[in-house]
Structures are given as C-alpha cells and as structure tokens.
Image (cartoon, rainbow, N blue to C red):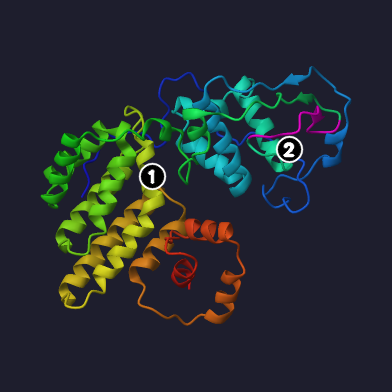
Amino acid sequence: RQAVPPPMQAFSLPATGFSSAPLVPSPVPVALPPGLAAALPGVPPVIDPHLLQLQSLPSSGTDIQVSLPSESSARWVIDCTAKYVLQDGCPFEQHIMERERGDPLFSFLFMPHSPEHQYYRWRLFSLANGDTLTQWNTTPFVMVAGGTRWLPPPNAPPPTGEKAHLHNTPLPLGSSGSAAVGGVAMTDDEADEFEEMLRSLTMERADIRRAMGFCLEHTPAALDVVETIVESLTLSETPIPTKVARLYLVSDMLHNSSCPGVKGASLYRTALEARLPEVFESLQETFRLEGVGRITQEALKRRVLAVLRAWADWFLFPEAYLTGLQATFLRSGGSGRDQAALEAELEALSAEDLDRRCRRSGISSKGGRAAPISRLL
C-alpha cells in the first residue's frame, strides 16, 4: 500500500532554469591508458596518452583553464561522480542526469560551459589516465587531436580537518549529491518518536502515510532514518505483519524519492539501494524460518513479490538489481547451474570487482569474501 503523492510527470523538471532538452551524456572523449579501455563503454580512445607528456600542444581554439571548485562539497560531488562514471560507464552518467536534474548539486552536468562542468570533464580525463584525487599531471594537453588545449589546475595541498573527512568519504552507491545534506543525526526525541512509529506500524494506509510523512520531514537526517528502518527490518524477532508494513513504508519512500518539492528526498532511494540486499536477506530467512505456516509463507511471498513488481513498474532500479533481490528472497539453496565453473569465476574476481558485481545484482556483499560468493552462486 502506498500513500500516493499528487500526480506528477516522471522525471519532471522544477523551475530551476535547466534546459528541458533530451538528456544526452556529455561527450567526453577519453584517452584511456592500457587496461582501462573498457572502463567507458562506447567511448573510444581518441588520443595517445603519451601526448600528455608534451609541454606544448597545438590548439585550435582558446585554452581552457581548469579551476578547482571553491566549495569543498561541490568538489566532492564532482569527484565522486567522475569516479563512478569511469568505473560504471556512460550509462551511469545518463542515470544521474535523469534522476538528479532538479538537484542544484548536479547542475554542472547540464551547464557545459560552466567552470564546474569543465572541472568535471578534466577530472574524468585525469582519472582515466592514472591520476588520483589528490595528485595529478599538470602538463597541458588536448583531448582530441587539433582540439582545444586544457590547462589543469595546480596541485593543491591535501584537504585537512573536516574538508579532508568530506573528500575521503565516498558518495553512496548509486550516487546522489544530496548525501551532503543527509548525514545529520536525528535528535533523541525524534529517534524515539520514529522507533515507536515503527514498532506500532501496521499495514493500514493511515499508518504508512504518517510514517512516510515523518521521513519526508526529516530528509536532513535521511541516512539516520534509513539506518533505523533497515535495523527494524532485519530483526529476526519482528512479527511478519510488522515486517511487511515496514517494507510498505520503504516502498512509499522510494515512490516519493523523486518528489521535486522535497529537498534531499532522492537520497532515500540512493541510501536504500545500498541497504536493500540486507533487507531481502532477512526476509528470506523469515520466509524459510522453521515453524512458519504455509499460508503465512504464501502471504509473505505474495506481498514481497508485489512490492518488487511495483518497483519495476516505477523504473526505480535496474532490472538486474531487482532480479537479484527477488532471487535472494526466493533462494532455497542449490541450483541447476554449473556452480563449479561459476565459483571459479567469482573466486578470480578482485575484491572491488566482486563488490561491484554484488551491487549490480542486488546482492549483499557483507560477510567477508565467502559470503557474497555463496549468495551469487
């Protein structure tokens, strides 16, 4: 059950001054070094990386002087975005542009002549050529032979204090610049109120609406809110009807995460995407729990699968992610596949690649190395 907001067009654009033209990922021709050629599918190398070593390169136009963003939070968002686009490909940039076009923190994607967009394009090129977020090549270069010459910013001293903590904190998987405003903790009174709300939550529409209203009113503490909900959903002693009611609350939060009138609401989708595999692991344990009657099992199964179908209809997550959540919930152990070959393939993956595969498949990566491999099997 969901508390449906007033009808609105999907991906509607608030009055921010951004163009309403079709979304097209910004063309970033990248000179990829060996081993990184597949990092950006569909973007071929267009220049020999060794040209980066030249002190003087021909330019067909005005030089572009790249400057570091003055706000550390803006630089953090741009750096994280570039890092994930390099890691997951141009479709990830398209996904961000579709989901975050109303968020001022991502305005740099829609303003190709802004200093922030120039910094983003340079950062993506820089990371693709082996630079880091703290040290980079300052030699002028061109991205396309005969094109405009780019002048990187000088290497700046590493951030210190709070700025260092911000810059070393990764953007939550799935990306959302709203994370910078979602890390406030709830007060003790607010936490007590919300926990009591979750304890008494039922599948009644009014209860779900009231709890969802609390979440939307506390988007500055979105990460804390999500942590509280996930903990409540993974408690083994929670009665099944209460778990289902909390899952309905999560569904409503996801449905309303793109509300243009609620600042930071999109962070709920991002934060929940990273935690839902844990939730469905717990639901699977509840579903297979000894002593649960067949009628209760079927009722739980029907409701959980209905929620997943709704998420698919709303285009909230990639199909592979939702398929992974469903497989986690219905898993009964063992399959007809050649598990030996698949296990060997998974064992050969690096820790980073294994985590990425779990993330894309909607599988929890917690529990060391053996646990996620067993889940993928």
Mark 1 or mark 2: name the one nearer the start of the chain.
Answer: 2
- Res. 338 in view: no
- Is residue 219 covered in magenta? no
User: Is residue 357 shown left or right of residue 137?
Assistant: left
Looking at the picture, how far across and down is residue 311, in whole percent? 35, 52
- Residue 29: which numbered mark, if any? 2
Identify which residue is drawn at 21% across, 71% down: 298
Identify which residue is drawn at 41% across, 20% down: 15
Q: In terms of depth relative to the viewer, which is nearer, 346 or 164?
A: 164
**Residue 118, image quadrant:** top right
- Is residue 138 covered in magenta? yes
- Residue 248: which numbered mark, if any? none
Rate crowding at label 1 as few (under 14), some (14 to 19) or many (20 or more) other CA atoms within 10 Å: many
Identify which residue is drawn at 38% across, 30% down: 181
Looking at the picture, how far across and down is residue 279, in whole percent? 32, 58
Q: Secondary structure at mark 1?
A: helix
- Res. 152 in view: yes
Q: In terms of depth relative to the viewer, which is nearer, 97 or 239?
A: 239
- Residue 271: which numbered mark, if any? 1
Q: CA distance from mark 1 to mark 2?
A: 31 Å
Identify which residue is drawn at 34% across, 64% down: 281
Q: Indicate whether 102 appears above or below 346.
A: above
Query: What residue type is disc 1 on?
Result: Ala
Q: Secondary structure at mark 2?
A: loop
Asked if the residues shown at circle 1 and circle 2 are in contact, with their CB atoms under 8 angstroms apart, the answer is no
Q: Residue furthest front?
A: 161
Magenta span: 134-145
Q: How many marks?
A: 2
Query: What residue type is disc 2 on?
Result: Pro
Looking at the picture, how far across and down is residue 100, in whole percent? 46, 34
